Amino acid sequence: MSRELARAISAVEDGTLRVHELLRPALVIGITGPPGAGKSTVLDTLLGELRSEERKVAVLAVDPTSPFTGGALLGDRVRMNNADSGVFIRSLASRGAGGGLAPRMREVLSLLATHGFETVLIETVGAGQEDIAVTQVADVTALVTTPAGGDSVQAEKAGLLEAADLVVLNKCDLAGADGAARDLHDATGLPVVRMVAKDGTGAAELLAALRGIRRGPQHASASFQIDHIGVATSSIETALGFYRDQLGMRVTHRETVAGERVHVAMLDAEPSRIELLEASDENSTIAKFLATRGPGIHHVAMRVPDFEAAIARLKDSGARLLSEPRIGAGGHRYVFVHPASTGGVLLELIANEHP
């Protein structure tokens, strides 16, 4: 079964297999934190606790991508001392995706659920404050740090702290552990579990805390949201005569986006918006659209929970992107997907950074 599962995961990673019905294991635990904090050792002690209960466990270790093979840079991982026949371990390459997670992680989790794995431990790259995408797939997320890193972790890893459900203070046999635990709790308001992972101290307490806090993946009920519908018009002022003056919609934002050579007016249609688009240059995309099709719906814009991972998935699957990500109206990052890849709709994907 392990070989069959490994082959299926590889096929999901390279895009030759798509999982359409997404299932979930009973418990998905995210382990993140800066390098050197002992994430792998903490994860191994959790593995030991779970196997003592005879739980069927999978470990997904996300690693940087090899520039030569495209696979996980640390794919020959041998650090899990508590692994036995009831444990499946897989290294996944980040493949350039942001957020410290690998593309198509939800599909991989679904495969594991299909193969009967009840609990999945995800260890992220955890190299920076943006590496928080694990919260979108994990039921509960632990940030691992040490007494030596406790004072600086809030400033250097603010994003990780905001995403975590609890803090694991590892290497508590070092000096300063008491003060670091107190400071971390005061600074974050999060529970702090003290551990010496190398000898298993605190492992049972950590597992109990994770199970007690479990809250489900963030954005699970609204992973994708329609942000706005773009409407091309030869005159924003004329269009406002209907949308604002007759219909009564409120204008929330006006801007000229120089890079796209377009004037923009946003109207509130809570929870979505209507974006009026007027060409600022006769050679702009909107001018060409009006010349060939006339006024009307130009595109549909959708916010995605992990912008970089979504783009990586699209590129892997051969979807046609019209550009690399750019900065658009309101300062958000966006990219357009060609109608040939979406069934006839010009689709704008927007980074979900300003909900």
Image (spheres, rainbow, N blue to C red):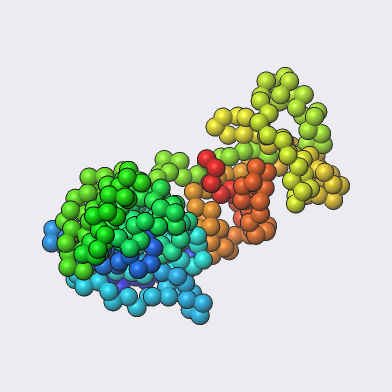
In this picture, is 177 found above or below 226? below
Name the residue located 71 percent from the left edge and 42 percent from the top edge.
Answer: 298
The x and y percentages for residue 27 are 27, 52
Residue for point 37% across, 56% down: 151
Quarter assignment of residue 107: bottom left
Indicate whether 81 appears above or below 203.
below
Is residue 202 among what the camera can see?
yes
Q: In screen coordinates, is 50 left or right of 88? A: left
Q: List x then y, in percent, for residue 169.
A: 27, 57
Q: Judge by depth and name the residue closer to the eye, 210 or 90.
A: 210
Count all numbered tags in the image, as a single digit.
0
Pinpoint residue 349: horizontal percent, then vertical percent: 59, 49
Quadrant where the N terminus lies?
bottom left
In the rendered image, the vertical position of residue 79 relative to residue 277, given as above or below: below
Give the residue furthest to the right. Answer: 282
Q: Which residue is at 24% across, 63% downward?
A: 175
Q: Relative to 292, say whether 273 is above or below.
A: above
The residue shown at (73%, 39%) is: 255
Asked if residue 110 can be seen in this view, the reply is: no
Task: Report x, y in % for residue 218.
Answer: 40, 45
Observer-nearest of 117 and 42: 42
Apparent side of residue 59 relative to residue 269 in the rendered image (left or right): left
